[in-house]
Amino acid sequence: MPEEVSPARYGRLAARTLGPADGAVIRDNGFEAFAKMSSEATRQLPGAVEEYRAWVRPWGFTPEDLTLPVDVWAGTDDELLDASWPSP
């Protein structure tokens, strides 16, 4: 895996491509720490794959169908999730 061969290079690349807020977290915690975390996260790949599948596949309901209070947390600098979600 690239993160194991050259952790500093992998961390610097991730810090440049993941957006300013994520890049700052990576730089603040160290490129090698990010590489180690990435390597561990992908060690048992089926779990990571299932997380991505849950993120992109239809849920079978809309947030408006929920009948109990739900909090949706997202960072103000989140580039993966539209800040207006789940609002129309």
Image: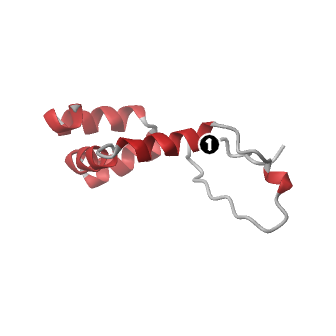
Q: Quadrant of the N terminus?
A: top left
Report whether residue 79 is seen. Answer: no
Q: In this view, does 48 lie to the left or right of 42?
A: right
Instruction: Choose between 42 and 46: the one closer to the eye.
Output: 46
Query: Is residue 18 or residue 71 the one in the foreground?
Result: 71
List the single residue furthest toward the left.
5
User: What count of labels does the image hold?
Assistant: 1
Tell me if 86 is positioned left or right of 45 in this view.
right
Residue shown at the point (36%, 41%) measured from the top left:
45
Above/below status of 17 relative to 71: above
Q: Quadrant of the C terminus?
A: top right
| Res 80 quadrant in image | top right
Residue 16 in percent (x, y) is at: 36, 33
**Which residue is painted at 37% across and 51% down in the image?**
25
Which residue is found at the position 20% from the left and 46% from the top? 32
Residue 61 visible in the picture: yes
User: In the rendering, at what x and y percent does residue 9 appear?
Assistant: 21, 33
SS type, badge 1 = loop
At horizontal 35% and vertical 38% (from top left) the residue drawn is: 15
Vertical relation: 13 (above or below) 27: above
Query: Of the residues shown, which amino acid type is indicated by label 1?
Result: Leu
- In the rendered image, residue 57, in percent from the top left (x then y), is placed at 64, 37
Percent coordinates x, y for residue 21 in the rendering: 46, 46
The residue indicated by pointer 1 is 81
Label 1 crowding class (10 Å Cα cut-off): few <14, some 14-19, many 20+? few
Q: Nearer the viewer, residue 69 or 21?
A: 69
Classify 40 as above or below 4.
Answer: below
The foreground one among 7 and 44 is: 44
Colour mode of the rendering:
secondary structure
